[in-house]
Amino acid sequence: MPFSHHSHSGQFCAHAKDTLEDVVKAALAKKMHILALTEHMPREQQDLYTEEVGGYSAKVLLDTFRRYYDEARRLQQAYLSNMNILIGMEVDWIRPSSKAFIENLLSEFPLELFIGSVHHVHCVPIDYSTALFDEARHISGGSNEKLFEDYFDLQYEMLVALRPPIVGHFDLIRLKSDDPDTNFASMEGVRRRISRNLTFITEYGGVLELNSAALRKGLKEPYPNAAISKEFLGLGGNFTISDDSHGIDQIGCHYRELLCFAQEVGILQITYFQKDSSDKDLRFPNVTSKTITLSLLESHPFFA
């Protein structure tokens, strides 16, 4: 029963493609049983991306998210007999005031999960372009190591404030760096912060996504890399799988390689979320997490 807990559509995300219903149909055609719809949360005016400047505003982004929520609810009912659709969002922790902004969204929209992500450091996007990554690095003092430390400190701030059910692309900071396949081994301060964050995720029961988008973007390993994944596994942490798709051609992309990676790391089971009553996270009483063995997952026709 393949699944993805991280997806986007061009209907509600300016840097994606295809309609939300096309995304659902494509996942269904690929025999996915569970799909979490997780459009990006609306952001404040000063945080518009380049492609949004001029045509968007904070109000437009919020109105767009409302339309996304309504459409997601419609699709959830329309495909109820074919697929377990979960309605969520990907949050973006940018600054301390993000907490109140995100909590207001969670109050207004009765979601079923959310992904906790960091895409900015010093309020500068770090995965959008090399130029912006360089700007964030300059603010950090000019070194990759210091920027990495700042990234994982900001991530920890997000984890403590929100305790996200799923933690998104844990080491995204690698993507635009000089060495995107780094395992941070020589960076003692970075490694300490990674260990701290992983320990906290384990303690509150969060799930780390194995995100295949890194493979799609040319990296040798998914997010998080093998060293981080092995450490989290050693702590007793749980993993799910996601494609972070931004269009129907990316649904389930590199999932075969993702499963091979999980096997090499030593992961034996994968966590997934589905609609059901639960007391695991009182914020989401109608969603529960379950596990499937990696061998059983691999035997599904999706991987044939």
Image: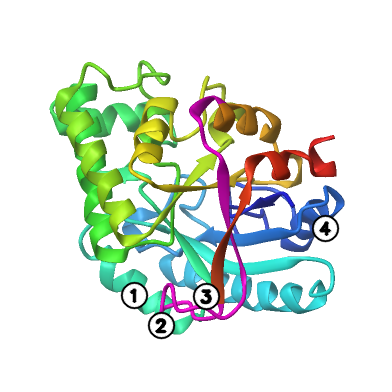
Name the residue that disc number 4 marks: 25
Q: Amino acid at mark 3?
A: Leu
Q: CA distance from mark 4 to mark 1?
A: 31 Å
Name the residue that disc number 2 marks: 107
Query: What crowding class fits label 4: few (fewer than 14 Cα within 10 Å), some (14-19), or many (20 or more)?
Result: some
Q: Earlier in the sequence, mark 3 or mark 4?
A: 4
276 inside magenta stretch: yes
Q: Residue 217 appears in which quarter of the rendering?
A: top right
**Residue 103: image tag:** 1
217 left or right, relative to 164: right
70 inside magenta stretch: no
| Image quarter in which the C terminus is found | top right
Task: Look at the image and give the residue range highlighted in magenta.
Answer: 264-286
Which one is in front, 57 or 82? Answer: 82
Q: Which colour style is shown?
A: rainbow
Q: Residue 224 appears in which quarter of the rendering?
A: top left
Query: What crowding class fits label 2: few (fewer than 14 Cα within 10 Å), some (14-19), or many (20 or more)?
Result: few
Q: CA distance from mark 2 to mark 3?
A: 9 Å
Q: Mark 1: which secondary structure?
A: helix
Q: Mark 3: which secondary structure?
A: loop
Q: Amino acid at mark 4?
A: Lys
201 left or right, relative to 265: left
Above or below for 262 versus 165? above
Q: Earlier in the sequence, mark 1 or mark 3?
A: 1
Name the residue that disc number 3 marks: 111
Query: What crowding class fits label 1: few (fewer than 14 Cα within 10 Å), some (14-19), or many (20 or more)?
Result: few
Q: Earlier in the sequence, mark 4 or mark 2?
A: 4
Residue 191 appears at what percent x and percent y? 22, 29
Which one is in front, 16 or 32? Answer: 32
